[in-house]
Amino acid sequence: MRLLRRFMRPSTRAFFEEADRAGKSFYEKVHGYCYARWPYLYIGVATGRKKLAALLTLPFSLWIVRHNPPHPAAGDKRASFADSYHGKALPLEEATRLVTLNRAVHVQDLEQVVPYKQAREIILRNPERIVLLDCPCRAVQENPCLPLDVCLIIGDPMARFILDHHPSRAREITPDEAVRVLKETDERGNVHHAFFKEAVLGRFYAICNCCSCCCGAMQAHRNGIPMLCSSGYLARVDAERCVGCGNCTRYCQFGALTLEDRTVRVGGECMGCGVCVSKCPKDALSLVAAPEKGLPLDVQRLAGPGGSGN
């Protein structure tokens, strides 16, 4: 492997060197490389959109499932697929803070923030390097939601890796442009998720701006694979302000809002993403802290004034 690295692109070599420092196994290195190198094929197979490719890559798929089964048997201590690959909902303000960091960040011990066994660390080097990527989930759909370029890859080495290997689908943008993307996707009713993946260095690497009709993770979550966790907030309704227009229910990506007696009710499916808040014309909705759902991913608070978070 080390001999092969002499012939690799600098960004590929940087990925493997970072994986070495993180103590990743051979499986994790190969899995992470394949995921980042061929994300459209990977997501297409995972979502069942590329059936022929699924047959051709069956041995690799079985290898992944063997290491990370979707639902481990009772007493099985192995991590599930959701443990190794998951997203945390972010209200717009928190997502904005994450893309406007101007310093390196290293935050560990995120059990109360990201409640999974694996992939719950934040290490951002060059956080100002942000790459806008065509969403793999949307790209493999026959009639995807538009625009396609809504995924934000943040920090090296992943941002540089994606930029080098997908020049026709990715471009580097400034933090200000990333904020614009977040605001525009928020206006469309998309949910911001901070994604973590064990094979991608076991840490946060992207903000995906998701819609339930295209997002593979949201569909898997709806079908019983708990790939998403709450923002740490819940939507709250001011009954005196609510006029029962139902606008918020049309935008809720999780089906958590219902209209009863011309007043909106919030169900247990609420992820605290905040989409409904911005869609209420009467300001009858707000987000309130819900510690039982976990803590918010406020990177600036978690990292502290010094930036390391350790």
Image (cartoon, rainbow, N blue to C red):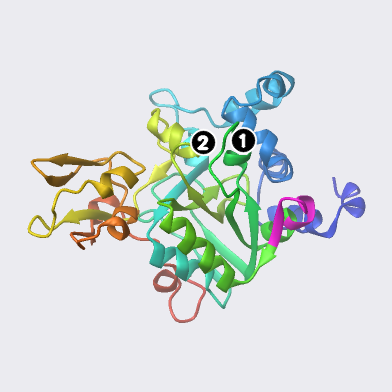
Where, quadrant-wise, is the N terminus in this rendering?
Answer: top right
Name the residue type under label 1: Ile
Left/right of residue 180 with respect to residue 276 in the rendered view: right
Rendered image quadrant of residue 171: bottom right
Element under disc 2: helix
Q: Are marks 2 and 1 in contact (CB under 8 Å)?
A: yes
Residue that appears at 29% across and 53% down: 276
Q: Residue at x 51, y 36 (%)?
A: 216
In this rendered view, identify the residue nearer to me: 65 or 88. 88
Amino acid type assigned to the residue bearing label 2 in the image: Gly
* Residue 221 appears anywhere in the view: yes
User: Residue at the location (44% across, 73% down)?
Assistant: 300
- Reading the image, the residue beneath label 1 is 43
Of residues 117 and 168, the one nearer the viewer is: 168
In the rendered structure, the answer to whether residue 25 lies left or right of residue 217 reads right
Q: Give the left or right position of residue 56, taking residue 243 as reference.
A: right
Numbered mark located on residue 216 in the image:
2
Q: Is residue 20 visible?
A: no
Whether residue 234 is situated above or below residue 99 in the rendered picture: above
Position in image of residue 113 (x %, y %): 38, 56
User: In the rendering, at what x and y percent does residue 99 appear?
Assistant: 53, 68
Mark 2–mark 1 Cα distance, whole angstroms, equals 8 Å
Q: Which residues are magenta?
A: 163-171
Indicate which disc residue 30 carries.
none
Nearer to me, 9 or 153 = 153
Image x and y of residue 267, in percent: 21, 41
Q: In terms of depth relative to the viewer, which is nearer, 218 or 111?
A: 218
Neighbourhood count class around disc 1 (C-alpha, 10 Å): few under 14, some 14–19, many 20 upward: many
